[in-house]
Image: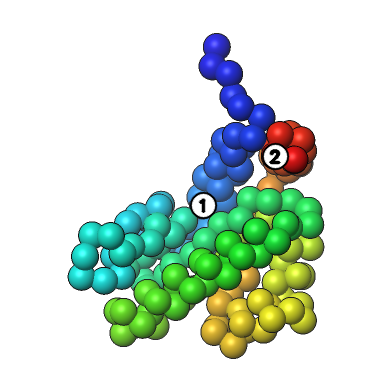
Amino acid sequence: METTHKSSSHVQMHAEDIIFQKVAALLGITLERNPKVFLADNTSTFMQPDFYSAEDKVVGEIFAHIGKPKKAQGNKIANDILKMLLLEKTTGKQYRKIIVVCDIEEQKSLEGKSVLAESIRQFGIEILYIELDAETQMQILKAQELQKMTNV
């Protein structure tokens, strides 16, 4: 039997897979999962969004976290937004930019009164809430608690 490190994110990755399927069904389009999307004329400058469709001009990130986010998570969202905006700038195309969350409080925070929330509004980024079943939510919460204890 394989041993999983306490700080492993396999539970969140599984939740992201569930969310990805729900987003694809909700949008009704074919999405690529974690593709390399090049942002310059070299092989080093690329992003790997959680979902993407060049044909439908959709790019998005999934955050499988429940509860109050740590500062680093807010920074990750801001960094992902910057990548989405760079994608638009380098391609000269307007994309439907989506951030997907599975915590209603996170949705409220990203739609709130912070600089990050205002940036999301000003740059036309959608916040999409996808509800997970109770079992998956509990698995995420347990994994986050283990990660907290390991990463102290």
Q: Nearer the viewer, residue 115 or 137?
A: 115
Placement of the N terminus among the 4 image quadrants: top right
Q: Residue 75 location, x and y as percent?
A: 61, 65
Nearest-to-viewer mark from 1 and 2: 2
Q: What residue lies at 55% left-to-right and 83% top-to-bottom?
A: 124
Query: Horizontal placement of 104 versus 32: left or right?
Result: right
Q: What residue lies at 64% left-to-right and 35% top-to-bottom?
A: 7
Q: Residue 113 location, x and y as percent?
A: 77, 81
Query: Horizontal placement of 93 versus 146: left or right?
Result: left
Q: Is residue 77 above or below residue 24?
A: below
In the picture as drawn, the residue positioned furthest to the front comes out as 152
Amino acid type, residue under disc 2 in the picture: Asn
Residue 85 found in image quarter? bottom left
Residue 52 found in image quarter? bottom left
In the picture as drawn, the residue positioned furthest to the left comes out as 41
Q: CA distance from mark 1 to mark 2?
A: 27 Å
Which type of secondary structure does the marked residue at label 1 adopt? Answer: helix
Q: What residue lies at 58% left-to-right and 70% top-to-bottom?
A: 78
Q: Nearer the viewer, residue 108 or 8?
A: 8
**What is the tally of numbered marks visible in this picture?**
2
Placement of the C terminus among the 4 image quadrants: top right
Residue at mark 2:
151
Q: What residue lies at 70% left-to-right and 39% top-to-bottom?
A: 151
Residue 122 visible here: yes
Which label is found at residue 20? 1
